[in-house]
Amino acid sequence: MAAIAQGGFREPNLLMKMASRPTAMAGLVIIIVMIALALLAPVISPYDPAQLAVRNRLLPPSWQNLFGTDDLGRDVFTRVLYSGRTSITVGFAVVIFASIIGVFLGLMAGFFRRLDAPVSRLIDAMMAFPDILLAIALVAALGASATNVVIALGVVYAPRLARVVRASTLVIRELPYVEAARALGVPTPIILVRHVLRNLTSPLLVQATFIFANAILAEAGLSFLGVGISPDIPTWGTMISVGRQYLDQAPWIMWFPGGAIIITVLSLQLVGDGLRDFLDPRLAKDV
Amino acid sequence: MLRSALNRIFGMAIVMALVVTIVFVIVRVTPGDPAAVMLGPDATAADIASLRERLGLNASIPEQFISYVGGVLRGDFGQSIFLNMPVTDALWQRAEPTFFLTVFSLGIATLIALPVGVLSAYWRGSIFDQAATTLAMFAASIPSFWLGLIFMQFFAVKLGWFDTSGYGGPGASFGTRMHHLVLPAVTLGLISSALITRFTRASMLDVLNDDYVRTARSKGMSEWRVVVKHALKNALIPILTVVGLTAALLISGAIVTETVFGLPGVGSLIVSAVLRRDYPLIQGALLVVAGLYVLVNFIIDMLYLVVDPRVRY
């Protein structure tokens, strides 16, 4: 808890600490590269991701088409880059949305004793649904679109964040400076934001990184099943779902988007693991 | 102990009540008329009206809720719209592949994870530990459906050892059906082993530094007995928790894996229910899966209570 009490996240040498851990640093660098590749897609690739060239369909990887071409002759490398935009954006949006709900619920449960039992039971009930199952049920109810996928996955992951926030809030609530602020008559909402929330950044950041990783996997699953983002929008999941139909003739269509998912998710996990070790030494020995 | 048990039963009842409420609410968040959404854009007004009648959507929301809860308590989860049969029958018909898939994947996952996790903790920081930890993290980063497709491409398409999909067709022998489960079970098992390995390692690390382990060593006990009889025995409860909860969560993996391998199980039934907007079936599946999860959780808590006299709820 020492890191929390000092507001670990705002320590200036976080990056330097990360540098001392090669795996975490490698994860961070790879994530930045993946985001850069997605953003710079039009600069990097000479092709249009939607450009049809039926004569070039199902070509194996070559110097012209690094990752080969798909069933409509589109360049797989280009589509993997553009898909990264959607997949990474959706993952990030899920983190933001889940954090907003999760922090709110967690603060309420952790800070106000009376709300603890009802909110905690609600969190328990939400966590009883496996993530993909609850997400597809919500998307089925809300309608399939990128926005609704973000909402559904946000609702799915919010309880996990809420649990972490609640646990930390229970500790922070009893610390002397919160008591002091109360004694001085600081209004509760200001105590919550200035004294409690600001000291929650470390555990929150660690959880957010893992949720980012899970959200990318879950989005890919939903898109693969065809119950999420429209198949017309390139995402890593929809690409694999197309590649599945050409498994025997052109397996590269699904190899490369899968590889992109693994690299992105693995590097996020490495970063999350590293962050947890620096920011919350108490947990470092677990897992 | 009785009081603790009663407390947990009460807690479980509340969580189950909330689960039922969430399942009821999910369908009501549909923008517009659920009956119209289910029937699609070509439905006539009369069709919609009759489906509304069948689903009881004309009653007020509190009335609908009471009749829904009443049905669930009697074991009646409603009628599937497209299959035209009770939801419980529809789920039951598809239970076999999902049941065996879950059992086999869990078996594979535990057989890998238990020894690897224990040795990882025992040789903490060694090359073995680092390799195992890295591999577990890698496995947790692989989308299960993608791994399934890779296996399918190699073992079914290229080597021809297995059929690419299905469950052997109607009337297939038990052996044929199980043969169709090999690739899906290996896929799910490998991916689930990641989580169980991490937990096994963490629980073992917790106990390996405990006093009784040191005492056992100083008595001159063999290392094997110290690790297996003393440490593992104590680490086993948290490990069992994860194994139990993984079992309940495997349905999530089953949804994707069954779709990849074309297995006619509960998972692929759920996907087709979602694609056809068969809300009663989706609700029934949610209830059964979440109910199992809560139940497994409860059984584990009760086991703790029996096994460890210090535990109180």
Image (spheres, grey):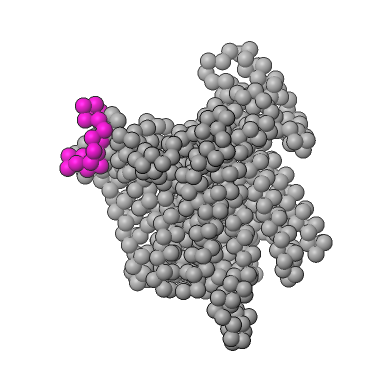
On the question of residue B251 being in view, the answer is no
Q: Position of residue B14 (x, y in %)?
A: 74, 49
Q: Position of residue A213 (x, y in %)?
A: 44, 52
Q: Tell which residue pokes out farthest to the left in this image.
A: A63
Q: Is residue A138 left or right of residue B141?
A: right
Quadrant housing the N terminus of chain B: bottom right
Q: Position of residue B36 (x, y in %)?
A: 58, 21
In front here: A82 or B108?
B108
Q: Position of residue A113 (x, y in %)?
A: 69, 60
Does the stretch in magenta take in B17? no
In front here: A164 or A184?
A164
Q: Quadrant of residue A59?
A: top left
Does the stretch in magenta take in A68? yes
Q: Is residue B60 left or right of residue A230?
A: right
Rendered residue at 23%/41% (across/down) = A61
Quadrant housing the C terminus of chain B: bottom right
On the question of residue B172 being in view, the answer is yes
Please tell me whether the stretch drawn in magenta is mainly helix, strand or loop.
Answer: loop
Q: Quadrant of residue B170?
A: top right
Rendered residue at 41%/57% (across/down) = B138
Magenta segment range?
Answer: A51-69
In front here: A83 or B173?
B173
Q: Quadrant of residue B212?
A: bottom right
Rendered residue at 62%/24% (across/down) = B83
Rendered residue at 66%/40% (across/down) = B287
In front here: B154 or A169?
B154
